[in-house]
Image (cartoon, rainbow, N blue to C red):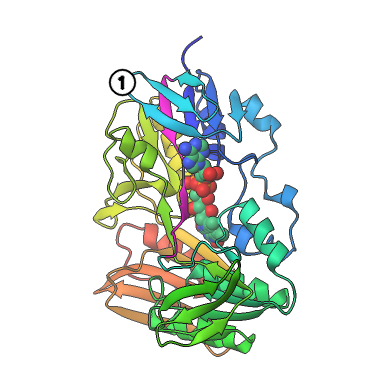
Amino acid sequence: MSAPLVIIGAGQAAAQAVTSLKAEGYGHPIVVIGDEPYPPYQRPPLSKAYLGDEMTEDRLELKAPHLYAEAGAQMRLSTRVVRLLPADKAVELSDGTRLDYGSVLIATGTRARPLPVPGADLPGVFSIRSIDDVKHFRAAAVPGAKLVIIGGGYIGLEVAAKARKLGLDVIVVEGQPRLLARVACSTISDFALALHEGHGVGVLTGMGVTRVLGADRVSGVELADGRVLPADLVLSAVGAVPNAELAAAAGLALDNGIRVDEAMRTSLPDIFAVGDVASFPSRLYGRRVRLESVQNAIDQAKAAAKAISGGAVAYDPIPWFWSDQYDVKLQIAGLLEGFDRTETEGDVAAGRFSVRYFAGDRLLAVCSVNDPKSHMMARKALASPVPATVPG
Ligand code: FAD
């Protein structure tokens, strides 16, 4: 039998790659190696419906487990790839075994960025990336508990919304002058601030955190101005870092994650990378881009399946993303970095509007609040050859 395609990581991109490889008629065995005990599952509900107890664990599963076997893939869960050995065309696993490969697809995703202050490793300090993280967080999130969330980005704010629903006292501390500062304009930031304050969340912007306090468990958070916020639990939501160490040690080129070309090929033969861990050249944006989104994990996995099966691919997507907070759905099409002006359409006070981001005449992105029609039109407009205006 031929040496298998080894997929490292059993997440969103791996699940898609397996079914897409089957659709492409890929003829070699596939082995998926994942270090979590669960078959591939959706992460977005971890900070949304699953955290809020509105979704059961079984509904997180991306595909019924028998579909992987039917696609010719063997799943090896609770197993970590500890070394990638391109010269030997083999991987070493955490159970001490070694596996030869014909080709490799790296889909190792990201992990929570460590909080760079003393006390960050105290019991009671959480981050949310996995089912187990949510289970641990929920065990401590009893009604009336004081939660301090460090980081006012999407995940921090989604958790704030669900924590209020669970009856916690919530304060969000954000180092930037406004919420969602890296990913939205001030119109959206102001809207998010009013939304969360309206639901009883305390918000401190432009405020650093210097220490997490506590003896054998977290008891508070010390702010840059010397104040102390009492805390029973702390959520660190300060971004994610790519799990690229395995690739780095194997000699693959890195560039804010694993460097791939438009067909998901890394710098070494027969090794591909996809999803949150991969940075790809975007002709659309004229630069290298690494995306942390379901859209990107799925579409890159499809592209890699085609490339691994010998097809021609040129991945260059219109990125899109969403966030749910209370009864608000935010949807973002495109990337807004480099915008020099915005246009707002709709009714901000009524909580139904869209903001368009432009660089000169060129439409870069659209952020829609409870406005799904505009979001869908934005995705079409951005995909058109001269994405300058959004109809309607
Ligand atoms: P992952 O799904 O993260 O899977 C990678 C897997 O590889 C993990 O299980 C990891 O443990 C495993 N792994 C790592 N190293 C090894 C190794 N050496 N050996 C074996 N296994 C390994 N995106 C959206 O578009 N919309 C949202 O609303 C949204 N919300 C999110 C909310 C949360 C709380 C989180 C955490 C993410 C959210 N995302 C959202 C992002 C989205 O989930 C990711 O972009 C997507 O899961 C990336 O897929 P992936 O396959 O690259 O990585």
Q: Which residue is drawn at 48% across and 85% down?
A: 204
* Nearer-the-camera pick, 387 or 304: 304
Q: Where is residue 190 in the image (x, y as percent from the top left)?
A: 47, 86
Vertical placement of residue 150 versus 380, above or below: below
Vertical placement of residue 114 versus 164, above or below: above
Q: Quadrant of residue 350?
A: bottom right
Q: Residue at x 41, y 24 (%)?
A: 103
Residue 72 appears left or right of 152: right
Q: Does the magenta stretch include residue 107?
A: yes
Residue named by callout 1 = 87
Amino acid found under the numbered disc labelled 1: Ala
Magenta residues, start to end: 101-115
Residue 241 appears left or right of 280: right
Q: Where is residue 23 in the image (x, y as percent from the top left)?
A: 54, 29
Task: Please tell me whether mark 1 sits on a helix, a strand or a loop.
Answer: loop
Vertical placement of residue 372 versus 30, above or below: below
Q: Where is residue 274 in the image (x, y as percent from the top left)?
A: 42, 41
